[in-house]
Image: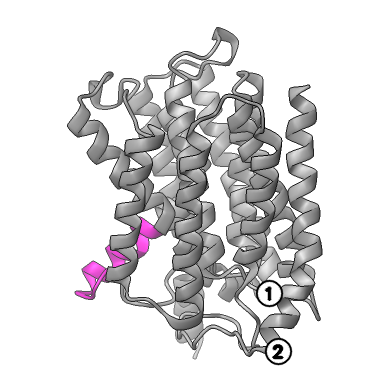
Amino acid sequence: MEIILILSALILSFLLVIVVVPPIIRTAKAKHLFEPFDERKVHTEIVPPLGGVAIFIGFSISAIFATDGLAYDALKYIMAAVIIMFFMGLKDDLMILSARKKLIIQIVTVILLISFANIHFTNLHGVFGEHKIGNLTSFSLSLFAIIVIINAFNLIDGVDGLASGLGMLASSVLGTWFYLSQNYPQAIMAFALVGALAGFFLYNVFGSRNKLFMGDTGSLIIGLIISVMIVSFNELNLTAPEPYRIGGAPAVSFAIIIVPLIDTLRVMAIRIAQRRSPFSPDKNHIHHRLLSLLGSHLKVTLTILAGNVVLIAIALGLNHWQLNVNLQFITVFLVGLGFSAIPSYVLRTKRAKKAYSA
């Protein structure tokens, strides 16, 4: 029965997105609903940034429909948070909100999510030698982690298919574990997101006449939902049945979303080192570097996804070998950091050779 609900959420969300995208594009073009110019963008054509509307519709309807009758009180609060992210992102896509206003809205939303949906960390699984943590630490860590994940997915949305591809990968891995560990409402939510993102991915990557971007509306929703699943994954592992319990849950969850996290950390460190605001725009993201090397959005997306899969496999392997969770975390971090530095190193080498030959 549960697998039918999960598959229905996956298929329904996919079909809903496929159906609603064409009228969204027609409306956007008729009403001239396009995002303002941004120097960080790598696209030159005018494309509606309203893919997040389709993702919101597909995910929300399918998740609510498929979880009907299941005991999951947190869903109503999660959906309330998704709705807030939706309207904030939509306004930013069409009119631009200041970074300060967006951060304030995010903080208020996440506080409500922590307080009413009980989406928060209570245990660090031995990271830094800590296990059960107090209320203040739990609140502060959860608020910080969720805000970081939301904005990391927002920042990684730079080439066709990347944010949606990473979202599908993360949701598929988490959703599979939720299903195996019999946490069915969370599995439904995960695969509802997979279906919605799969439908969007087709239009975003392979669309010609019906091409659109997800905009902040989509990336903020993805970041919020995945952050909720990451917290749930860590918490549910505390009581998961033994065959599916992951002792190094923090390291594995870090590997699942490592690309947006490492990329955000790296570009902000570069900006600070250059004495610029960490939020100032530039083209130092990993997808910008890879695009200069590979020249194709699809190649960039597939390359990054392949790297992410490798890092997830490494994390699961380290967990299988029962390595200390701190060593797992450090290993995943260092390998991820090394991967993220490769494109910049190759570009510098090419430029140096070109300058030398000239």
CB under 8 Å between callouts 1 and 2? no
Q: Nearer the viewer, residue 355 or 138?
A: 138
Is 269 contained in the magenta span? yes
Under circle 1, the secondary element is loop
The numbered mark at residue 212 is 1
* Residue 26, placed above or below residue 236: below
Amino acid type for the residue under numbered disc 1: Leu
Residue topped by disc 2? 30
Q: Which residues are magenta?
A: 263-278
Under circle 2, the secondary element is helix
Tell me which label, 1 or 2, sits earlier in the chain.
Answer: 2
Residue at x 60%, y 85% (from the top left corner): 33
Q: Position of residue 309 (x, y in %)?
A: 61, 42
Q: Nearer the viewer, residue 198 or 349?
A: 198
Q: Position of residue 347 (x, y in %)?
A: 49, 72
**Colour logic:** one colour
Residue at x 26%, y 32% (from the top left corner): 138
Q: Nearer the viewer, residue 44 or 88?
A: 88
